[in-house]
Image (cartoon, rainbow, N blue to C red):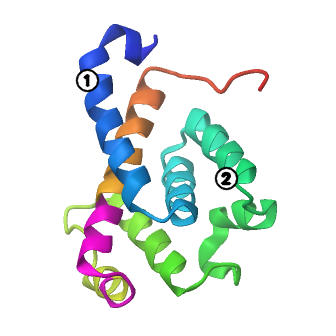
Amino acid sequence: MNPGEVAPKAYQAVMGMEKYAQSNVDHTVLELVKLRASMINGCAYCVDMHSRDALANGESSRRLFAVAAWRESTFFDERERAALDLTDAVTRLGEHGVPDDVWDTAAKVWSEKELADLVFAIATINVWNRIAVTMRLEPPAQV
């Protein structure tokens, strides 16, 4: 199923959130967040797409592979680590929400506006992941 063809208005609404995130979140951080959430959600389509996008934009393969084990990696700076931690918490949102320590750490290194934009970006990739996984979208065989 192609969600853009079957439900074009819904697709465009989510695409509006995507365009907002692309315009308001640092591109490197945005791709790391997209990749991390997609890994957690088991979205092969999005892992493939965001890995390729990040590589095409100059991201190193070592950093991309390290996203899977970012807590143990030394490849990420303080802001990236806070963004990845927040991504983990928002993506795995439990009954108690985002832990205070995760939020407080992110709030120390991101301005209020940046933090709001980051939360919208994390929410957006989670929406895309749920669409792609549910509709069984597969990465292209060839790119």
Whichever of labels 2 and 1 marks the residue nearer the N terminus, that label is 1
Identify the residue at image location x=69%, y=79%.
73
Residue 138, quarter of the rendered image: top right
Q: Is residue 5 left or right of residue 7?
A: right
Give percent across and percent down for residue 35. Answer: 57, 53
Residue most toward the bottom? 108
> Residue pushed farthest front?
23
What is the three-letter code of the residue carrying label 2? Ala
Q: Evaluate whether residue 92 shows in this view.
A: no
User: Which disc, if any, is residue 10?
Assistant: 1
Residue at screen point 61% across, 45% down = 50
Q: Nearer the viewer, residue 128 or 40?
A: 128
Q: Quadrant of residue 82?
A: bottom left
Q: Residue at x 43, y 65 (%)?
A: 88
Q: Amino acid at mark 1?
A: Ala
Residue 102 pos. (x, y %): 35, 81
Q: Does the magenta run of residues contain 117?
A: yes
Determine the secondary structure under disc 1: helix
**Where is mark 2, residue-wise?**
54
Residue 127 in view in this figure: yes
| Label 2: how many Cα within 10 Å (few below 14, some 14–19, many 20+) | many
Q: Locate residue 143, reporting x and y percent.
A: 77, 26
Q: Which residues are magenta?
A: 107-119
